[in-house]
Image: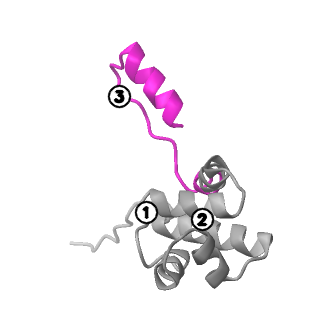
Amino acid sequence: MTDRIRHAAPEPSPVPDAPLLRHLVGDALRRARRERGPILREAAEAARGSLPYLSEIERGRKEPSSEAPAAVYRALDLRLADLLGGITGRLSPVCAPVSAPHRTTPAAQQALALAA
């Protein structure tokens, strides 16, 4: 009886993990604040928020409420759409396209197209 060496099929290359939304929001807030000039304390005061909470958000340690990023962006005279657009741009290269099921209704196809 001869021993056979079995070669396993090569494993597919791993897909990079998608970053957490709180990290993306925190990075975007910090980048926008630094570009506009105010220090963290000034941004927190202008947004009528707490300094520790804003710091935790910027470091990606807290899931911000929807009001917190909006308040900071208003305080920086920016639009919330700018924040969301920047986040979408950072997610696009990481997330692989999702294949649609074989039987997709027109409404589902439209929803998938809007989500992409």
Label 1 and label 2: CA atoms lie apart by 45 Å
> Which residue is painted at 70% across and 63% down in the image?
76
Q: Which mark is residue 101?
A: 3
Outermost residue on the left side: it is 1
Three-letter code for the amino acid on which mark 2 is drawn: Val
**Which one is closest to the eye, mark 1 or mark 2?**
2
Mark 1 Cα shell of 10 Å, populated few (<14), some (14-19), many (≥20): few
Q: Which residue is at the front of the view, 60 or 9?
A: 60
Q: Residue 3 at what x, y percent from top left? A: 28, 74
N-term-proximal mark, 2 vs 3: 2
> Which residue is painted at 58% across and 68% down in the image?
47
N-term-proximal mark, 1 vs 3: 1
Q: Residue 46 at what x, y percent from top left? A: 62, 71
- Say whether residue 42 is visible: yes
Which residues are the magenta region? 89-116
Label 1 and label 3: CA atoms lie apart by 24 Å
Instruction: Identify the residue position indicated by label 1 in the image.
Output: 11
Relative to residue 17, is residue 6 drawn left or right? left
